[in-house]
Image: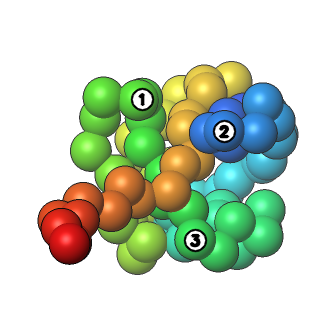
Amino acid sequence: MKRLSVVVAGTGQIRDVEIQPGTTAGDILNQLALKDYLLSKGPNDPFLAAAESVYDKVNDGEKIFASTKAEVGLRACA
């Protein structure tokens, strides 16, 4: 079992979770009720897929980041 601290972007919250082998990014987000968020190992790292196992990608005691996916679009001009 590994312990992680999940930093929730924009809220200032740090939430601690324990994971077991086979735990996915989606499992962590569901456990923390962060439905519209994605996980990454750092602010400049790619997001982990919801079905991706996190256990082998993190160290015990590591911080990971939960943030919403930025939406990019064109603004309509009048």
Which color scheme did the rendering employ for the protein?
rainbow
Residue, disc 3: 36
Q: Which amino acid type corresponds to the residue marked 1 in the rendered image?
A: Gly
Residue at (61%, 27%) from the top-left corner?
63
Residue, disc 1: 42
Q: Secondary structure at mark 1?
A: loop
* Residues packed near mark 1 inside 10 Å, few (<14), some (14 to 19) or many (20 plus): few
Distance CA(mark 2)–CA(mark 3): 13 Å
Visible in this render: residue 7?
A: yes
Is 75 in front, or is 67?
75
* Residues packed near mark 3 inside 10 Å, few (<14), some (14 to 19) or many (20 plus): few
Q: Which amino acid type corresponds to the residue marked 2 in the rendered image?
A: Gly
Q: Position of residue 13 (x, y in %)?
A: 81, 36
Q: Which mark is residue 10?
A: 2
Dots 2, 1 in contact, CB < 8 A = no
Instruction: Please tell me in which quadrant of the rendered image residue 49 appears.
Output: bottom left
